[in-house]
Image (cartoon, helix red, strand yellow):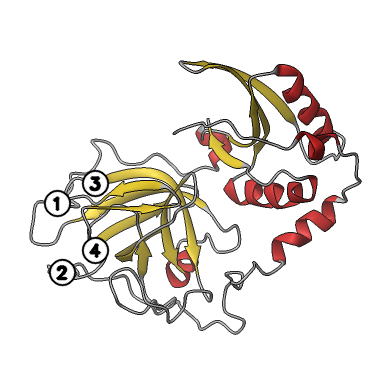
Amino acid sequence: MNHPAINVSMKLIRRTGYIVLAAGLAACSAKQVFEPRDAAPANPRDVSAVQNAVPRVEPRSRYGNPQSYVVYGKRYYTLNSSADYRETGHASWYGTKFHGRRTSSGEPYDMYAMTAAHKTLPLPSYVEVTNLVNGRTVIVRVNDRGPFHDGRIIDLSYAAAVKIGMLGKGTARVEVRAINPGGPAVQPDPAPLQAFVPPASAGEAPVFLQVGAFSNRDNAERLRRNIEGQAIGAVRIVETTTDKGTFFRVQIGPLNDIGEADRVAQALKPLGVSAARTRID
């Protein structure tokens, strides 16, 4: 993960304006400019009868499979095959905001179907997603690109999110394992997964929200004091030396999960901190 220095206006850092945390959190529910906020359906269907996607051999989609593509200034490289793909990380989900819209593969997104978005797997691909907190598992068909958010490896449809019990929290730590119809199956781990326990007991890497990085420690301390004055959360300064010099990174945490990091980031915006990024250490 890259850690570019984040410039924060000194004028805004010195500002002593009062912020009420509840108001900041309320901002999370405000509509984004030009785009509605994603959400679950107001009158959701019962998805208990929705079945897992059934893996089958399919030709690659005509759309959504370039050799590489760029989103938000970052280049992604499409994998030649899903064979042997396995990754552990955080999943998120998407719902009404994109329902009916065209996916990267050209198909309309159906939040009630067992589908998902992934940054690099070929379209379409089939994967098994296991919630590492509760052990629930789904099989989904990957037909879209995303999620383009730090620390997330897959975006599940609304139905799939309900099935593995991550809807309310918004994110979950998962294992994603490719299923290769017509080819050799990905071999399971030599030993089965241990009993599923909450991430804090399982030793999950803590989540921090990085809100600034400075070459001058005084500037980092100033930002730390400003944030601590708002009672938003514990703030630390991490000194890091790179080939570009020594930097002092201001971070809030540890936080419970990426969803909480998002909420804290929204609460910081009235302070002029708009370039916060999530770190999983």
Is 158 drawn above or below residue 259 in the view shown? below
For mark 1, give the secondary structure: loop
Cα gap from disc 1 to disc 4, whole angstroms: 18 Å
> Which of the 4 quarters of the picture holds residue 154?
bottom left
Q: Comparing marks 1 and 4, which lies closer to the viewer?
A: 4
Labels 2 & 4 near each other (Cβ < 8 A):
no
Cα gap from disc 3 to disc 1, whole angstroms: 11 Å
Cα gap from disc 2 to disc 1, whole angstroms: 13 Å
- Picture coordinates of residue 105, whole percent (x, y): 28, 70
Cα gap from disc 2 to disc 4, whole angstroms: 13 Å
Is 181 drawn above or below residue 78 in the view shown? below
For mark 2, give the secondary structure: loop
Q: Which of 281 and 136 lies nearest the eye of the viewer?
A: 281
* Residue type at the position of mark 2: Arg
Cα gap from disc 2 to disc 3, whole angstroms: 17 Å
Sequence order check, earlier mark of 3 and 1: 3
Sequence order check, earlier mark of 3 and 4: 3
Q: Residue at x 60, y 72 (%)?
A: 34
Q: Which residue is mark 1?
A: 185
Q: Which residue is mark 4?
A: 123
Q: Comparing marks 3 and 1, which lies closer to the viewer?
A: 3
* Residue type at the position of mark 1: Ala
Q: Residues within 10 Å of mark 3 (few under 14, many from 20)?
A: some
Q: Residue at x 85, y 34 (%)?
A: 14
Q: Which residue is mark 2?
A: 56
Q: Which of 165 and 24 lies nearest the eye of the viewer?
A: 24
